[in-house]
Image (spheres, rainbow, N blue to C red):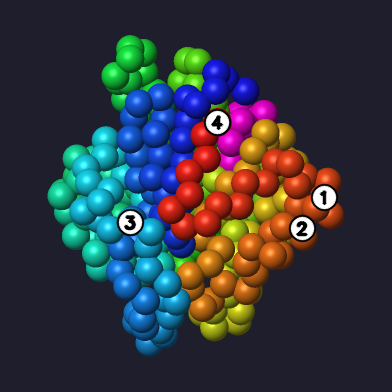
């Protein structure tokens, strides 16, 4: 691991997290709407709890990392308002086409550089993600993940809504060992693909941690929506079964961990 407290993550609930990466402030997947039913095409996704911080409390950040824009559990109405005023949003190329403004599509393995307040730079690199089983992209749409790197900083993987361990292996081949993995888990399932898993199950999250040789894992996107099939208890059990309980940092909304 790098020097202590060079990276902090504050879990806001759902997929949203506020990061400080060597002085570069980052917001992951802004979702600020209250609980309720949110339509997506002919389907409805139900949000069961609101965020730990409002958009106003989060305030401006250096960059938003948006895994994808097409689903309200990753970018909701208030999140879209936030994105409209953001300095820079890194996301998929299709999100850039749909949202415009400050949204920049970051292709796989391409990096964006940021100056750090204390000197030096940090890199955000786009990495592949698949929001469901093989062949599902034409149905669910394009999704991306991210890797954060910088001199004297930990290597951080932000998975986005990825359900493919094969893609995790591709990322590990370039970046393992990963110091901190922010894994979108929850085993999300909807009728869209006959209830196939759209994100990692708890057992797969533990497998991903092994593949990445992750020093620490902070789960995101495993609660606060009704279409998640697994939550915190299942994550704890899966990591315990894999002998990885020490790596798991299961935060409550509003809590912060430093690495």
Q: Which residues are magenta?
A: 174-181
Where residue 128 sits in the image (x, y, percent)? 52, 45
Badge 3 local density, few (<14 within 10 Å), some, or many (20+)?
many
Q: Does any portion of residue 6 appear in the rendered image?
A: yes
Q: Nearer the viewer, residue 143 or 123?
A: 123
Task: Say which element carries label 3.
Answer: loop
Quarter in which the C terminus is drawn? top right
- Whole-angstrom CA distance, mark 2 to mark 1, is 6 Å
- Queried whether the magenta region covers residue 87, the answer comes back as no
| Residue 187 sits above or below residue 239 on the image | below
Task: Say which element carries label 4.
Answer: loop
- Side of 221 where 24 appears, left or right: left
Disc 1: which residue: 242
Labels 1, 3: front one: 3
Q: Does any portion of residue 69 appear in the rendered image?
A: no
Of the numbered discs in the image, which one, if any, rests on residue 238?
2
- Whole-angstrom CA distance, mark 4 to mark 3, is 22 Å
Q: Look at 15% across and 50% down and name the residue there.
A: 85
- Whole-angstrom CA distance, mark 2 to mark 4, is 23 Å
- Whole-angstrom CA distance, mark 1 to mark 3, is 33 Å
- Side of 55 where 152 appears, left or right: right
Q: Earlier in the sequence, mark 1 or mark 3?
A: 3
| Residue 33 sits above or below residue 101 on the image | below
Task: Say which element carries label 2.
Answer: helix
Quarter in which the N terminus is drawn? top right
- Side of 150 where 80 appears, left or right: left
């Amino acid at each position: 691991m790098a020097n202590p407290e060079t990276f902090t993550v504050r879990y806001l609930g759902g997929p949203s997290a506020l990061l400080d990466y060597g002085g570069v402030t980052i917001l992951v997947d802004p979702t600020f709407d209250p609980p309720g039913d949110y339509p997506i095409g002919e389907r409805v996704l139900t949000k069961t709890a609101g965020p730990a911080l409002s958009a106003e409390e989060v305030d401006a950040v250096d960059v938003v990392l948006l895994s994808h824009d097409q689903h309200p559990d990753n970018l909701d109405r208030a999140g879209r308002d936030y994105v409209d005023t953001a300095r820079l949003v890194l996301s998929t190329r299709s999100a850039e086409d749909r949202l415009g403004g400050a949204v920049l599509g970051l292709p796989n393995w391409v990096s964006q550089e940021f100056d750090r307040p204390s000197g030096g730079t940090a890199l955000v690199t786009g990495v592949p993600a698949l929001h469901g089983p093989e062949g599902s992209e034409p149905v669910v749409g394009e999704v991306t993940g991210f890797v954060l790197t910088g001199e004297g900083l930990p290597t951080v993987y932000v998975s986005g809504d990825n359900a493919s361990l094969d893609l995790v292996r591709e990322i590990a081949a370039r970046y393992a060992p990963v110091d901190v993995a922010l894994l979108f888990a929850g085993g999300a399932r909807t009728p869209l693909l006959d209830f196939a898993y759209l994100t990692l199950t708890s057992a797969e999250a533990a497998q991903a941690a092994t593949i990445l040789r992750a020093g620490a894992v902070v789960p995101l996107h495993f609660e606060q929506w009704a279409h998640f099939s697994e939550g915190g208890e299942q994550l704890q059990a899966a990591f315990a079964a894999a002998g990885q309980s020490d790596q798991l940092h299961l935060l409550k909304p509003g809590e912060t961990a430093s690495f």
